Amino acid sequence: MSLNKKSVDDFNAKGRRVLVRCDFNVPLKEGKITDETRINAALPTINKLIADGAKVILCSHLGKVKEGPNEKESLAPVAAILSEKLGKEVKFIADYNVTGEDATNAVAAMNDGDVILLQNTRFRGKEETKPQDAGEKFAEELAALADDYVCDAFGSAHRAHASVAVVTKYISAKGGTNAVGYLMQKEIDFLGNAVENPVRPFVAILGGAKVADKLNVINNLLEKCDTLIIGGGMAFTFLKAQGYEIGKSLVDDEKLDYCKEMIAKAASLNKKLLLPIDTTIAASFPDPIDGPIEVSVVDANAIPADMEGLDIGPKTAELYAEAVKSAKTVVWNGPMGVFENPTLAKGTIAVAKALAETDATTIIGGGDSAAAVNQLGFADKMSHISTGGGASLEFLEGKELPGVYAADDK
């Protein structure tokens, strides 16, 4: 996949109608937005287009919209916050059809520098369908509202949805530009290039619960990185594959052969594969998840049959931190243990601290690892924290992301 894409800096938007796909999938509680991170992340691209004199038409999904279009998943609260942050009215088109007469009339009445926000794209129902049926009519109608298209929704870039990828075909057909926004560009620069063209030594750290979620990531990263570190629940399947007793720890028995293959692959490629050497154990999973829990630490090959591993141990944390010290590029996806529990967050904290203290380019691959770094107060010490969990994983797998692929090459 070519990663050299046209950005908002590569075309003249003055007087042009520019459709911008943002990621405004924000958490809402009783109609109020509880976390504005995604809205703030979209502002640089929107402000650039306003300054250029574009007519800016914003669109996004919000929620899963399982019960059909409804006011609880309307983008109206986003329009209100955007108006505040941009210091100008963002006209909201409440029409559940998204691209109906209201939208067409509002766009026709726009002046240069005006901003409108369309209703939740998923209200159309065809947004999430498979590529060959990805709401072609909806994509065509979206393109009819605009001259050019900018994708700035990395969190949705792994989906071939109407408003993410299919719309580009119709923009191209009318001679328009399909570009990426600043947020997408940053993800491509950091995540894409870290994997395809890393400054070495390149260390990848994978955690989280299941091996199954990261099968292709492990396989791809073993070919690209110099050292692969495994933590979290998925480590126990690797430990069991080595013949260790893992007690009641999380395990994916169907993936034992795969783990053996990966251990052999690392050896044949002369790559370092680091697995836990000790583990923090308890009699059962904490309930509630952040409640008090009694733990002890044992060697990774000596977990008692009636206990389960819930975090890496201190010796492992030291081993992993040491591996990060000499790195020039580090990618981290997935916590080292049940980080939501203060007693079981030590391994994740140790890894986050090691990343915060290194001079390497440090890239956090969205999802739980991004949440952990934010919660633990290390966010400002990282080079880049990805805004897309699923999309960043697919980037790490080496997959072509529809939202990136669909943008015009420079």
Image: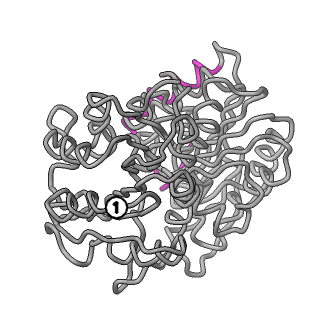
Give the side of residue 83 with respect to residue 162, left or right.
right
Q: Which residue corresponds to the image point at 23% horizontal and 72% vertical from the top-left?
A: 94
Give the image location of residue 137, x and y in percent: 13, 42
Q: Height in image: 52 above or below 165?
A: below
Q: Indicate the quadrant where residue 344 lies.
A: bottom right
Q: Height in image: 259 above or below 310?
A: above
Q: Nearer the viewer, residue 101 or 344?
A: 101
Give the image location of residue 154, x and y in percent: 47, 47
Extreme-top residue of the structure: 268
| SS type, badge 1 | loop
Residue neighbourhood size for the residue with mark 1, other residues' Cα within 10 Å, grouped as few (<14), some (14–19), many (≥20)? some
Give the side of residue 375 with respect to residue 289, left or right.
right
**What is the basis of the colouring in this image?**
one colour
Give the image location of residue 166, x and y in percent: 27, 36
Give the image location of residue 270, x and y in percent: 70, 16
Q: How many circles with numbers are drawn on the protein? A: 1
Give the side of residue 303 with respect to residue 35, left or right.
right
Give the side of residue 169 with respect to residue 336, left or right.
left
Q: Which residue corresponds to the image point at 80% horizontal and 34% vertical from the top-left?
A: 328
Q: Which residue is mark 1?
A: 110
Q: Nearer the viewer, residue 63 or 122?
A: 122
Q: Which residue corresponds to the image point at 78% horizontal and 26% vertical from the top-left?
A: 200
What's drawn in magenta, residue-wise? Answer: 244-266
Query: Looking at numbered disc 1 in the image, what kind of residue is underneath it?
Result: Met
The main secondary structure of the magenta stretch is helix
Q: Indicate the quadrant where residue 205 lies.
A: top right
Let me know if residue 313 is in the magenta part: no
Q: Height in image: 181 above or below 98?
A: above
